[in-house]
Image (tube, helix red, strand yellow):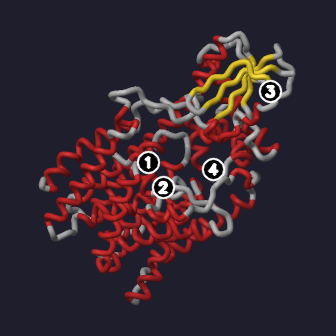
Amino acid sequence: MIKSNSILNFVLILSLIAGVFLRLYNINHDNLWIDEMATFWVTDPSISFKEMLDRHSATELAPQFYYILIYFIHNIFGYSPDIARYFSSVTGILSIFTIGYLVKILKDNGSFKLSIFLVSFNVFLISYSMEMRTYMLMFFISSLSLIFILKYFKTKKNYFLLLFFITQVCSTFTHPFSVIVFASIAILPFYQYILKHTYEKNFIITLVFTGISVLVIIFIYYFNLKISSDYLWNEQPTFKFFTNLYFSQYFGSRALGIIHLIILLFLIFKFRIKILKNDFLFILLTLFILSYIIPLVYGLYKPIITSKYIIFVLIPIIVLISVLVNELENKILKNFLISLIILTTIGNQFTEQNFKQFFENRKHFKPQYDLALKYINESNYKNFYVDLNFAKTDNLKRNYLLMYKNYLEIMSKKNNYNEIQYVQKDQNYNSSQVWILCSHIVYGDNCKKSLANQTILEERQFQNLYLTLVTID
């Protein structure tokens, strides 16, 4: 068995280099998908700040903080689909260091090396570090909140409580699910008083003010929310979910997910007394539990849970595994588990597109609008529109029309496709033929059904994007 210290010293530098590289390389390989188009449309720098907020309230469920940042970034660096993805990659890269630093503060015994490895090679975090959405920012800010709480526990310096307050407010303005992080911390004083008959006045005062601020933010935001619940397409998880708790998504495969889940549960059971005696480990365990329980319970009223909404659950998962596995006194078992984690994680990378792209062509998982527009530009027919029949309401159709139109016209301009024109369905065209784009990723199997009464002249498919030339009667 390879010595654990030798393994971790070797993989540390490898992890940092690979973690940064994988979050930047080929970041714009895929076109935007519909949620990213919404972000792109909302943060158009050519519109006023007020109009940006109006667009946000009409289309997005997440609060404004991320979109305000991207709006100003677009004003500074230009309006391109590439820019906001690089912002996500930067927060993803910073998260490697914040999680490593969090573990080092918690237990300075080399555990941070394993945590850096796990964050760097985590396929879920890599994926969302390459998306124009709010999730990596939420993950990053959540890690900062936990760092400031832990620093307060270690130093008792009150300015760390102020920093915690600021980051928690920012986190709440980023995504409502981040309230779960606050709830996990807010439970601690009750636990301390019941179990230890102690409490910390400044800590409790900070939690009270933070809690009031969080509730006010959520109330004001959702009271003024204009969009319909038609945007909520979630379903309550089936029994299969409870067999892996999204670990298969978080770690890249069902086998790897089960390995990490079993190791985590074993370590929690093995060190249950240590966890209950350590305030910060208790917070991490509480965060792990509440990340699932709160959305599932609320889901009995309206399903809301998805793996990306609770992306911060990876923080307690990674930190607990990294710290507790190094607490094992049995060196053979410790070395075996560390080796198993490292070798299976690296092995799994060769099944992922992040690594496979270096020795074979990288696959596309999102609609290839660039190829569709190129094909239209080279054809004899220059009019096209997007099939929006998947939208349930007129409000959704209107917003999606604007999103698609904005993105596709910018792509056309970027590629000098000056002759092709995005038109609205049922308007007068320059000819009796028109191209229809339909994305399987948002429309399911209904793309072809919507063409049932059309005269089809030609069909093409670009990954999960259908391009069809029809005759308008």
Q: Which amino acid type is shown beneath numbered disc 3? A: Gln
Q: Are marks 3 and 4 in contact (CB under 8 Å)?
A: no
Q: Is residue 361 above or below residue 86?
A: above
* Circle 1 SS class: helix
Q: Position of residue 51 (x, y in %)?
A: 73, 40
Q: Which residue does the image show at 44% across and 88% down from the upper left?
A: 194
**Does any portion of residue 122 appear in the rendered image?**
yes
Calculate the distance from the C-alpha at mark 4 to the C-alpha at mark 2.
Answer: 19 Å
Task: Identify the disc placed on residue 311.
Answer: 2
Question: Looking at the figure, which quarter contains the C terminus?
Answer: top right
Using a 10 Å C-alpha cutoff, classify the residue at mark 2 as few (fewer than 14 neighbours), some (14 to 19) or many (20 or more): many
Tag 3–tag 1 contact (CB < 8 Å): no
Which residue is denoted by mark 1 in the rendering?
124
Mark 1 neighbour density, 10 Å: few (under 14) some (14–19) many (20 or more) = some
The disc, 2 or 3, on the residue closer to the chain's N-terminal end is 2
Identified at 14% across, 65% down, the residue is 331
8 relative to 50 in the view: left or right: left
Percent across and percent down for residue 407 are 65, 29
Identify which amino acid the numbered label 2 is placed on.
Answer: Ile
Residue 400: image location, x then y, percent: 72, 38
Dot in front, 1 or 2: 1
Secondary structure under badge 3? loop
Up-down: is 231 above or below 366?
Answer: below
Q: Position of residue 154 (x, y in %)?
A: 32, 69
Residue beneath disc 3 = 454
